[in-house]
Image (spheres, rainbow, N blue to C red):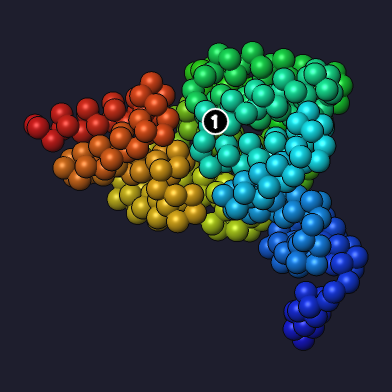
Amino acid sequence: DHNANVQTALEEMLKSDDGEVIKDMFDLVKEMGDWFLCELLCRRLCELRPECLGCKNDMANVLDSQGKYVEAEMMHRLCWEAKKKELGEEHPDTLTSLHNMVLALGNQGNYAEAETLYQQCWEFRKKTLGEEHIGTLHTINNMVEALIRQGEYAKAEVLSRQCWEVMKKTLGEDDPDTLRSLNNMALVMDNQGNLDEAERLHQQCWELRKRTLGEEHPDTLQSLQNVTYASFHQENYAKAESLSRQCWEAMKKTLGEEHPDTLAAFHNVAHTVSRQGNYANAEQLFRLCWEAMKKKLGEEHPVTLNTLNDMAVVIDDQGNHEKAVVLLQECCEARKKRLGEMHPDTRESQDALAKSLRNFSV
C-alpha cells in the first residue's frame, strides 16, 4: 500500500535526530504547498534546534499559511524580540519579523494596531532600504489592506496607486507583488463605489494571476473571489453565486474547509443566495459559516461579525423581526467595540438594526 508506506516513512522521519534531512524535506514539502506536513516537520526542527530563529520564523510562516494567526503572531513576536536584541531595531531582518508579526495581527482583525505598526515599519524601511525597495513596498501594500479594512478608502487609494506604479516600473506588470498592488487598487475602487473600474481591474488581475500563478494558487482564488464581489455589487447575483461556489470548492480543496479564506468564500455563497430571495437556505448557510468562524477566528473578529450581521438581516427578511433585533444589537455593540462607532461596518449594522426595529414595531 503506497499510502501506508508514505505514512510509515513520515513517522520514521519525525523520530529522526538528523536536522539536515528534516530541513531538506521541509523545503521540498513547502514547495508542494502541504502546510500541514510542513508544520509537523517544522515542530520537529524546533525541538532539535530550540535556539534557531530561522526554524521559529519558518514555523510562524507555516502557521500563517494555515490561518493559525494567534499562534503565528506569538512566534513572530518571539523572533522580533530576539532580533531586536541581537541585531538592533532598524536591521532589515528585525523589520521583516516586525512586518510578519503585524500581518498576523491584521489577520486577527486588529486593524488599527496593525496600521500603526505598519507605519512604524514603513518609516524604518524607507530610511534603511530606500523608498522603492521591495521590502518597503510590501509594507505599503499591507498598510493599504489595513486602511481598506478600517474604511479609510481615500488614503488607501493614494498609497495603493503609488505602490502599483512603482512596482510596475521596478518589477514588471506580471510580477506577483505588482498584481497584489493591482488587487488592492481594485478593492479600493470597489469600496468607493467605482464599480465598473473595480470589475475591470479585478478581471485583469484574475487573468494575469491565472496565467502566471495557476488557477488554484491562493492569490488567483483571492482574485476570483474579488471578481465575485464585483458581480455582486453590480447586482448580477446569479453570476456571483456561480463564481463564489467555484471559488469555495477550489479553496476547500487547496486550503481546507476551515481556513479563513475558505470561510470567507463560504460567506459569499450565502450572501449571493440571500440576494436572490432564497432566505431560508441563506440563513442555514450563514449559520454554518458563523459557527465555523466563531471557532476559527473568535466571536468578535470583524469577519465573524460580518457573517452575524448578514445572517440577522436574512432572519429579518423572513419576518422574524424580534430575533433579528437581538442579533443586530449584539453585532452593533461588538462592531462599535472592535471597529469604532464611525466605521462603515458599524454604521451598516446600525442601519440594519433601525430597519428591523421599524419592522418589529409595525
What's the amino acid at mark 1?
A: Glu
- The residue shown at (66%, 17%) is 159
Task: Name the element at disc 1.
Answer: helix
Above/below status of 41 relative to 3: above
Q: Which residue is mark 1?
A: 113
Quarter-of-image position of residue 227: top right
- Local packing at callout 1 (Cα closer than 10 Å; few below 14, some 14-19, many 20+) is some
Choose between 356 and 341: the one closer to the eye: 341
Q: Position of residue 18 (x, y in %)?
A: 88, 71
Q: Quadrant of the N terminus?
A: bottom right
138 sits left or right of 286 in the view: right
Is residue 127 in view from this perspective?
Answer: yes
Choose between 105 and 239: the one closer to the eye: 105
Is residue 274 in view from this perspective?
Answer: no
214 sits left or right of 255 in the view: right
- The residue shown at (78%, 19%) is 126
Q: Position of residue 207 (x, y in %)?
A: 72, 34
- Seen as rendered, the residue at the extreme bottom is 1
Q: Position of residue 294 (x, y in %)?
A: 42, 52
Q: Position of residue 41 (x, y in %)?
A: 76, 66
178 sits left or right of 253 in the view: right
Q: Quadrant of the C terminus?
A: top left
Please give the count of numbered marks on the rendered protein: 1
Quarter-of-image position of residue 348: top left
- The residue shown at (52%, 36%) is 110
- Seen as rendered, the residue at the extreme left is 362
Above/below status of 157 relative to 204: above
